[in-house]
Amino acid sequence: KKVLYARSEPYPSLESLKHQAGLSDKEYHTLTGLSPKEYHIQKETYLFSIAGETKDTTVNTFIKKLKDKCEFDFVMLSTLDGLNITDCGTTNSIDKEELTAYIPKLISTKKEFLENTNIRQADDFSFYLGDSCLSVSIAGNVYFTCIHSSPWPNTNQLKFLHSLRDLVAWYFSYRLVL
């Protein structure tokens, strides 16, 4: 009711909805799925500036735009137990269903190896499969997997992937309901 009574014209943004309608943080979160915190809004705006999308996009569209913008051949989000949420692109000779199923085991094996060798834990892993470089990042409750367009991604590309992983994990922890 607050939203309807306060509306004299269309709200220019979700942020203005909170302020003009006088919504509490909890009411705003219930209506939009977003946190009203300014830094959350800034992070979301930055993430969408990377993908070139608006906040009204679907997960599938977002992943496609991200793949194209970042010049990956393939991008996939999957659950920690090996279920595909969404994917986009081509995997060349790699079967997507097998990849989705094997990633949890592959990552747990690598993490176990690191634990046994007292090497610092990692959340990003890159594997070379023939002439393809596959990078897998643990992004909160999902795996963020990509196949690089280049067979040998450089340090800057891997650093960008690391920061992108953090943003994707943050965003989908707030916006994606499995």
Image (cartoon, rainbow, N blue to C red):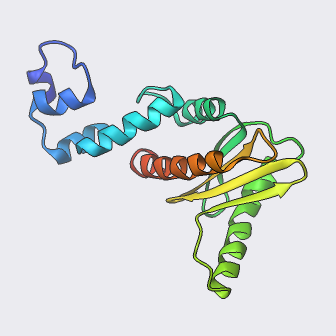
In this rendering, does residue 127 appear at all? yes
Q: Quadrant of residue 6?
A: top left
The mark tally for this picture is 0
Percent x, y of residue 108: 67, 73
Q: Is residue 92 above or below residue 135?
A: above
Q: Determine whether 108 is above or below 155 in the image.
A: below
Using the image, determine if residue 81 lies above or below residue 41. below
Answer with left or right where residue 19 lies relative to residue 156.
left
Q: Which residue is located at x 74 percent, y 68 percent?
A: 106
Q: Is residue 1 visible?
A: no
Q: Which residue extends farthest front?
A: 155
Viewed as shown, does residue 117 lie left or right of 38? right
**What residue do we see at 70% from left, 80% from top?**
113
Whole-percent x, y for residue 39 in the image: 28, 45
Q: Residue at x 78, y 41 (%)?
A: 150
Compare residues 56 and 154 and report the one nearer the observer. Answer: 154
Please identify the quarter of the rendering in which residue 105 is found.
bottom right
Question: Could you say which is closer to the camera, residue 50 or residue 156?
Answer: 156
The residue under the point 53% across, 31% down is 51
Task: Answer with left or right where residue 31 lies relative to residue 178.
Answer: left
Residue 25 in picture, x, y percent from top left: 17, 45
Q: Residue furthest top?
A: 9
Q: Is residue 140 left or right of residue 23?
A: right
Q: Is residue 81 above or below residue 10?
A: below
Q: Quadrant of the N terminus?
A: top left
Q: Nearer the viewer, residue 153 or 17?
A: 153
